């Protein structure tokens, strides 16, 4: 049995950004589309300066960096060389093999160059327009009101050439929208700040007082820098890395006892060891030199990576929930891992192990995690969050880890915890709740239990497992009430959704 309730079924649109100096002023609810046709000249001594700084002014189309075709061609050439096997090299000889690779490389570079000549971007009003394609021309207009985050990435080749790639994340996008590859690092950072400002992701008070200097580095306040030694050690304290020496010793012992080494056996052992170590090694490369800072607009700036460096700006009002994890092998050092659920962030594609860029703290002690959560969610103390376990009759469903499950309500957030070997916790601000569900399975109905699901824009966030049925309904009612009140009290200066009027029809409960 499943029933849904939506605390705020009609969220309002974000307020448009304030582009003129001075304190925030009241503006109409719908100022209308931007006007691009000629009109009467503005009145005042600063009319010319304001017209030049207007976000609706159309600009000429810009191209990507001239080295972009070479970088794209280099990746394609590497794929071609890998596709041509050693067997092909043995059949045609080294000289012919080199000529084939050279011919294909020239063709790829020419194709990339022509594609670069047909690719451009420019900002028109509140839209980023991108034109690309050779055989099939594409013209895309990305409304900046839907923009959630802009990330600067620097793969290895981009680092060697001083370039960067800009990736846009929009509301409802299942993948990164229109990556711009490649720009100079300075141009990518300046374009990111401009797009975020036009999207209204900068608080009004900061936007009004911060001077606009194109390309100027933003003032940032460093918050944290994780030691690389801790990153490496944390990945060595994973089950696959911890058990790898025992597996290798078992294979070596078998080979010594049998007295024979075969090529297939050695290759299989090496391949298995490389596969086991692949994920920890990938995590080390991704979390290398992890740094956190806060910019002048109050947003969180996250930087990390070795072979591919990434710089992401996270508006704190887009954070839907915070996840806390205490792995079994980390608890001896009192370490934890913090992650963010960011609304509208699709993250890298093609890698199921890392579906989104959600790192808040790859590894750190409890005091560091406590301070970071307080910084992201003011007033929330990680070590003082109250939770209560399910009733004793739920032990049928959780015979060994009943006391590891729990749920609780603090003044600011909804807290749930679960897990036995790996302990986890989810912290969800009430203003981010989108719906509350009460679900009963067949065994739960016989035991008089139910599970409460608290969903955010990013999906399922808080789960109160196996609560007493009456407690589950009371918890769902209380979550709905607190979510509605939190949305009504959300400040507009942070770029949050404007408050909605209270309604008596926000939720409909069907009690058994």
Image (cartoon, rainbow, N blue to C red):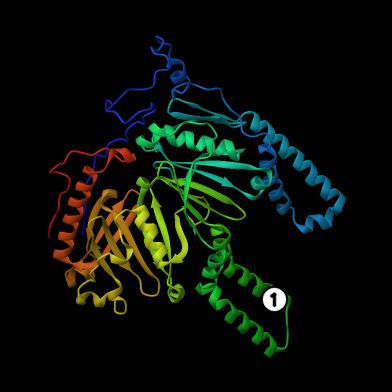
- In the image, taking residue 266 as reference, residue 503 lies left or right, namely left
Q: Residue furthest bottom?
A: 257
Is residue 49 visible from the viewing direction of this image? yes
Is residue 6 visible from the viewing direction of this image? no
Could you say where residue 274 lies in the image, as x and y percent from the top left? Answer: 62, 68
Q: Residue furthest top?
A: 40
Kindly identify the residue that appears in the image at 54 percent across and 78 percent down: 243
Up the image or down, 127 lies above or below 274; here it is above
Up the image or down, 220 lies above or below 200; here it is below
Q: Quadrant of the C terminus?
A: bottom left
Numbered circles on residues, count? 1
The quarter holding residue 398 reads bottom left
Could you say where residue 131 lies in the image, as x and y percent from the top left? Answer: 55, 29
Q: Quadrant of the N terminus?
A: bottom left
Kindly identify the residue that appears in the image at 52 percent across and 57 percent down: 290
Could you say where residue 220 lies in the image, as x and y percent from the top left? Answer: 48, 46
Element type where label 1 sits in the image? helix
> In this orientation, which residue lies closer to the viewer: 238 or 317?
317
Could you say where residue 312 lies in the image, as x and y percent from the top left? Answer: 49, 47
- In the image, taking residue 327 as reference, residue 467 lies left or right, namely left
The quarter holding residue 276 reads bottom right
Using a 10 Å C-alpha cutoff, classify the residue at mark 1 as few (fewer than 14 neighbours), some (14 to 19) or many (20 or more). some
- Residue, disc 1: 266
Up the image or down, 112 lies above or below 410; here it is above
Kindly identify the residue that appears in the image at 42 percent across and 72 percent down: 334
């Amino acid at each position: 049995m499943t029933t849904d309730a939506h605390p705020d079924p009609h969220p309002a649109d974000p307020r448009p950004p304030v582009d003129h100096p001075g304190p925030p002023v009241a503006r109409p609810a719908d100022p209308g589309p931007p006007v691009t046709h000629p009109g009467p000249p503005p009145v005042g001594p600063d009319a010319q300066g304001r017209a030049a700084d207007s976000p609706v002014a159309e600009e000429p189309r810009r191209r990507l960096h001239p080295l972009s075709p070479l970088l794209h061609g280099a990746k394609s050439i590497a794929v071609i060389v890998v596709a041509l096997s050693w067997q092909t090299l043995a059949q045609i000889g080294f000289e012919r093999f080199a000529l084939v690779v050279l011919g294909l490389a020239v063709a790829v570079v020419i194709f990339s160059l022509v594609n670069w000549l047909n690719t451009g971007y420019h900002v028109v009003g509140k839209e980023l327009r991108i034109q690309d394609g050779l055989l099939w021309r594409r013209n895309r207009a990305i409304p900046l009101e839907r923009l959630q985050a802009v990330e600067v990435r620097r793969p290895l080749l981009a680092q060697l050439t001083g370039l960067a790639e800009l990736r846009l994340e929009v509301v409802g996008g299942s993948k990164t929208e229109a990556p711009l590859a490649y720009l100079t690092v300075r141009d990518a950072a300046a374009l990111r700040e401009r797009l975020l400002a036009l999207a209204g992701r900068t608080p009004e008070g900061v936007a009004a007082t911060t001077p606009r200097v194109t390309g100027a580095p933003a003032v940032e306040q460093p918050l944290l820098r994780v030691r690389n030694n801790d990153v490496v050690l944390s990945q060595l304290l994973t089950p696959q890395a911890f058990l790898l020496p025992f597996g290798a010793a078992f294979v070596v012992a078998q080979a010594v006892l049998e007295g024979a080494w075969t090529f297939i056996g050695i290759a299989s052992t090496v391949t298995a060891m490389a596969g086991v170590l692949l994920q920890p090694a990938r995590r080390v490369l991704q979390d290398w030199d992890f740094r956190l800072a806060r910019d002048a607009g109050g947003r969180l700036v996250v930087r990390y990576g070795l072979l591919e460096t990434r710089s992401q700006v996270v508006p704190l009002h887009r954070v839907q929930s915070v996840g806390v994890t205490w792995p079994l092998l980390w608890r001896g050092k009192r370490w934890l891992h913090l992650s963010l659920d960011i609304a509208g962030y699709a993250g890298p594609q093609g890698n199921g192990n890392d579906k989104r860029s959600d790192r808040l703290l790859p590894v750190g002690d409890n005091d560091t995690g406590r301070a970071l959560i307080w910084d992201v969610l003011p007033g929330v103390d990680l070590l003082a969050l109250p939770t209560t376990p399910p009733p004793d009759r739920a032990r049928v469903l959780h015979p060994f880890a009943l006391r590891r499950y729990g749920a609780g309500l603090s003044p600011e957030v909804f807290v749930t915890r679960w897990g036995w070997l790996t302990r986890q916790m989810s912290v969800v601000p009430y203003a981010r709740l989108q719906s509350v569900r009460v679900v009963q399975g067949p065994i739960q109905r016989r035991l008089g239990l139910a599970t409460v699901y608290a969903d955010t824009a990013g999906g399922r966030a808080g789960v109160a497992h196996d609560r007493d049925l009456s407690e589950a309904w009371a918890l769902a009612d209380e979550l709905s009430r607190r979510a509605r009140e939190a949305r009504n009290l959300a400040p507009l200066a942070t770029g949050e959704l404007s408050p909605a009027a209270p309604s008596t029809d926000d939720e409909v409960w069907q009690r058994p």
